[in-house]
Amino acid sequence: MPNPLLAEWSTPFALPPFDVISDEDFEPALMAALKESRANIAAIAENPDEPSFENTIEALELADETLGRVLSVFYNLAGTDANPKREALQRSFSPLISEYSSEITRNRALFQRVEAIWAAKDSLELTEERHRVLMLTHRSFIRAGARLEGAESDRLAEVKSRLATLGTEFTQNIVAEERSWVMDLADSDLIGLPDFLVDAATAAGSEKDRSGPVITLSRSLIVPFLQFSPRRELRERAWRAWTSRCANGGETDNRARVAETLRLRSERAHLLGYADFASFKLETEMAKEPKAAQDLLMQVWAPARESALLDAKLLRAMLQADGIDDDLQPWDWRYYSEKRRSAEHDLDESELKPYLQLDRMIEAAFACANRLFGIEARPLKDAALNHPDSRAWEILRNGEHLAVFIGDYFARSSKRSGAWCSALRSQRKLGGHVAPVVINVCNFAKPPQGRPALLSYDDARTLFHEFGHALHQMLSDVTYETISGTSVARDFVELPSQLFEHWLEVPEVLSEFATHAETGEPMPGEMLERLLAAGTYDMGFQTVEYVASALVDLDFHQGEPATDPMQRQAEVLDRIGMPSAIAMRHATPHFAHVFAGDGYSSGYYSYMWSEVMDADAFDAFREAGDPFDAGVAARLEEYVLSAGGSRDAAELYEAFRGKMPGPEALLKGRGLAA
């Protein structure tokens, strides 16, 4: 029987045939795909014809088609449904893929062809898109060390291989710790917990084969437990377990891996001629240099910290009014903040949550996309997907197929934490039109059998955020995969996702789709008003925990690497005056954005950079007087969502909005400025 990963896929829309792929298929498929890719690279490098855009740059675009197909399926399953076999394969694959990548950039004949085309670019009459792809290809070779020779080239390959292994181990350690920690809840521990949390904890206990409800390290369980449990000692136990992941000694402790990662990243930057890794990384981003990112973060830090300290005084008074003679601690904040929110805004999460059904929020996201961009979602009932919990839709426009969208929404012990969007297949036109297959992965609490899944407002925002990323992929309209969809500057990639969150705040959207799980009645108008009025509630806390993480990330990657990252983390937090009752959103040993790979390393600030733009971008709809204004939506699609990385990010934004914004709209939107 042929390997299903290497055969032609006759499934609907050529979806991966997950139902016939076994773990034993991956290693032989990878080896065959690497062999094919190496042959393709050799053919390009050894081509006797004069280098041209077509026989070199376009040929490189298609050289790894089979390899990309194999890896997209594998990494989806490794991230969403890990098992020991897949984890072992991931560890063995990482250095192999790094080695292949290094072979390409160290191929002198190949690089000479790219250099020759780059040198002749002004005489080639390239289209704007082709010129952009040529520039990005040439730049990627340079930044990967193509101009290094001898021992320096060899060392860079070794460094990149080791970094790939460290990133894989870092991620797998987080999953292992989250999988293993469980806190059983006795009947007395359930006092004060809302029904939705008891239901979710019971479902989690069932998945873990426990006799009763449990709290795991899933955010969808930990956060509401910290919000509602009156048992301070249990809150502390849960909080400490959550925040100390991978810092407890033993094989899954990531602290030594972080130190080695920082040292190797610094060496990589020095080999390439940069002062430090942050300078290397940000050169290609909108910020261009670390100082620009830090300046923005500090502009936000000061008012956020002031707001958080004022809130801390109020929460401390509530704590002491409960007869607790102690300072406000990090495991107290969410509990007393929830009480304060209930008192000040008359918002009770247990009353709000039944109106935020997962299915209805999915419908809301589709409906907003339909009104803005004219797309429709049609369920795919019989598609074989990555997990039984996943579901899929065909995305159409004007009756024509545009993409396939997959949603994998529920937390499970085999899935890594967080939420993300990835493409099982990216859009392109080269070699024939290729329609994208896009997946959103979340970690919402799974309800007991037969009960609807209920979201917090933060969960609903996450759903909209990830669907914004999906729109960026699905509406992509470019020729080359290199610049397709979310293949843009890191501090631009969060613009579509964070912008789409704003439609959740549009009153008419919630009025239509926020319906009660039992009665079907729409959210009462006065509750809707209170929900939206509380939109910036606790924003000091949320901003401080995020900005602190972003500042630590930037500091890690500037100057000499920290020999003791935990000490460096503490020094940064002390220097900026981190409030004692707030912790970093992501402590270093489980800061997956930064250490699971290079994606957000030196770049966690990018959410804030993009938020400057998303606040300004939504103002364009406000200025038009309609959150669904067709003209503004058309410009947004033309210059942002469909353009991918076909032009410089700043150029694209200025084409959409006319100018780059300052942070004023961001501060106002977060309630940190008048």
Image (tube, helix red, strand yellow):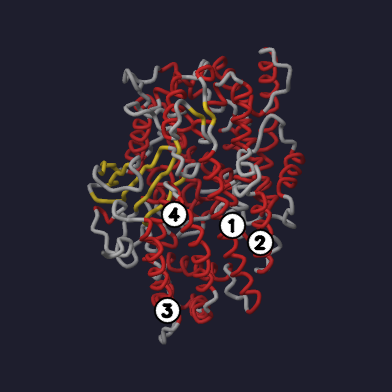
The amino acid type, in three-letter code, at marker 4 is Lys
Mark 3 to mark 2: distance in Å?
Answer: 32 Å
Query: What residue is drawn where x is 74% and y is 47%?
Result: 568
Q: Earlier in the sequence, mark 2 or mark 4?
A: 4
Q: Earlier in the sequence, mark 1 or mark 4?
A: 4
Label 2 Cα neighbours within 10 Å, binned few <14 / some 14-19 / many ≥20: many
Secondary structure beneath dot 3 equals helix
Query: What residue is drawn where x is 59% and y is 36%?
Result: 242
Q: Where residue 124 appears, x then y in whole percent?
A: 44, 77
User: Of tags 4 and 3, which is closer to the observer?
Assistant: 4
- Residue 166's label in the rendered image is 1
Query: What residue is drawn where x is 67% and y is 19%?
Result: 314
Q: Horizontally, is 559 left or right of 386 in the view?
A: right
Pointers 3 and 1 in contact (C-beta within 8 Å): no
Q: Where residue 254 appears, x then y in whole percent?
A: 63, 49
Q: Horizontally, is 147 left or right of 92 in the view?
A: right
Residue tagged by mark 3? 44
Residue tagged by mark 4? 85
Pointers 1 and 4 in contact (C-beta within 8 Å): no
Which quadrant, please, contains the N terminus? bottom left
Q: Where residue 252 appears, x then y in whole percent?
A: 60, 48
Nearer to me, 54 or 162: 162
- Residue 264's label in the rendered image is 2
Secondary structure beneath dot 4 equals helix
The amino acid type, in three-letter code, at marker 2 is Leu
